[in-house]
Amino acid sequence: MDFKPRIIHAYPGGVPLPFYMTYPEYTGAADPEKLKKDMEYFQHTYPAAVRRYQRRVAEVMDKLDYEGSMIYDEYPDRCSLQRLASTIKDILKQEAAAQNQEEMSEESERWLENMLQVLVCNEICLRRNGSSKKSFWRY
């Protein structure tokens, strides 16, 4: 059986709807406030160590949150984002050394820096999309 002609002719003008528009309660583009609340909720479910890293990222981003900052560039430079994550990693390593914690392996440091890059990009997206200057990581 050939279903395609019946499906195409079922829509006005013979053009089928995209699959996501056939979902019930589809309202078009998502509400930015709802997306922000979802993002904040899921960030509160991060593991304890990641929440600690996120707080440090938010503190550093507070210092970079000014008009003309690189975080508000249309396309921030990848090297700048990597350098920022590396700077935060160095701060975290200094804090760990001050608390007499054991040294991280090279693989752990790479993993931490990659995770920090993701957290930095995430924080930049939140700040660009109308999140308050002070982060919600104050609990």
Image (cartoon, rainbow, N blue to C red):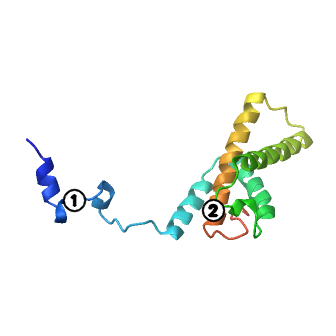
Res. 10 image quadrant: bottom left
- What amino acid is found at the position of numbered circle 2 in the picture? Leu
Q: Residue at coordinates 78% horizontally, 59% vertically from top-left?
A: 59
Secondary element under disc 1, as helix, strand or loop, is loop
Instruction: Report the front residue among 33 and 84.
Output: 84
Give residue 15's mark.
1
Q: Is residue 55 left or right of residue 11?
A: right
Q: Give the answer, above or below, for where 5 lies relative to 112.
A: below
Q: Give the answer, above or below, for where 77 lies relative to 37.
A: above
Q: x, y (%) of residue 49?
A: 71, 45
Q: x, y (%) of residue 100?
A: 90, 38
Between the C-alphas of marks 1 and 2, the distance is 37 Å
Q: x, y (%) of residue 102?
A: 85, 32
Looking at the image, tell me whether mark 1 or mark 2 is earlier in sequence order.
Answer: 1
Q: Mark 2, residues whose alpha carbon is within 10 Å: few (<14), some, or many (≥20)?
A: some
Res. 23 image quadrant: bottom left
- In which quadrant is the N terminus drawn? top left
Residue at the spot of label 2: 126
Q: Is residue 75 left or right of residue 86?
A: left
Q: Is residue 126 left or right of residue 71?
A: left
- What amino acid is found at the position of numbered circle 1 in the picture? Val
Q: Residue at coordinates 74% horizontally, 46% vertically from top-left?
A: 79
Q: x, y (%) of residue 87?
A: 82, 47
Q: Residue at the left extreme?
A: 1
